[in-house]
Image (cartoon, helix red, strand yellow):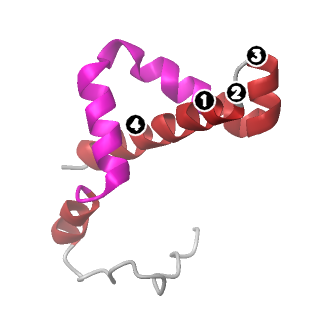
Amino acid sequence: MIPAADTSGGTPAPSGDPAEFVASLTDTSLYSIGAYFADRHPDLVDDVVAQAQEIEDAGLEQWAAAEGIAVERAFQTLITGLAVRYYKAVAGSR
């Protein structure tokens, strides 16, 4: 089992109520980005998640170079893929 993350960096401490905690996860920018992308581009969700995994596996700069794109664009793809995964995980638990 992975130990719980330290929540001393400004993240609210869990309330003890799982439903309340999960609801609080929807009030984040990452959730909003994932929800927006999934809503607007449902046909691209699997692709962006797969690309984010490729970036994680290869490394940001290496993936960008292999794809012939700017590192900033690769980073946007990575963040979008992570946001979609976050959204799907949280929304799926409701």
- Residue 16, image x and y in percent? 24, 82
Compared to 4, does 28 lie above or below?
A: above
- Residue 93, image x and y in percent? 25, 49
Residue behind mark 4: 84
Q: Three-letter amino acid code at disc 3?
A: Gly
Determine whether label 4 and label 1 are within 8 Å by CB: no
Residue behind mark 3: 68
Mark 4 vs mark 2: in front: 2
Determine whether label 4 and label 2 are within 8 Å by CB: no
Q: Three-letter amino acid code at disc 4?
A: Val
Q: Residue furthest bottom?
A: 8
Determine whether label 1 and label 2 are within 8 Å by CB: yes
Nearer to us in this view, 73 or 3:
73
Compared to 81, does 25 lie above or below?
A: below
Residue behind mark 1: 73
Q: Is residue 26 left or right of residue 50?
A: left
Marks 4 and 3 sit apart, C-alpha to C-alpha, by: 24 Å
Residue behind mark 2: 70
Q: Three-letter amino acid code at disc 1?
A: Arg
Residue 32 belongs to magenta span: yes
Q: Earlier in the sequence, mark 4 or mark 2?
A: 2
Q: Earlier in the sequence, mark 4 or mark 3?
A: 3
Determine whether label 4 and label 3 are within 8 Å by CB: no
Marks 4 and 1 sit apart, C-alpha to C-alpha, by: 16 Å
Nearer to us in this view, 88 or 74:
74
**Which numbered marker is on residue 11?**
none
Element carrying mark 1: helix
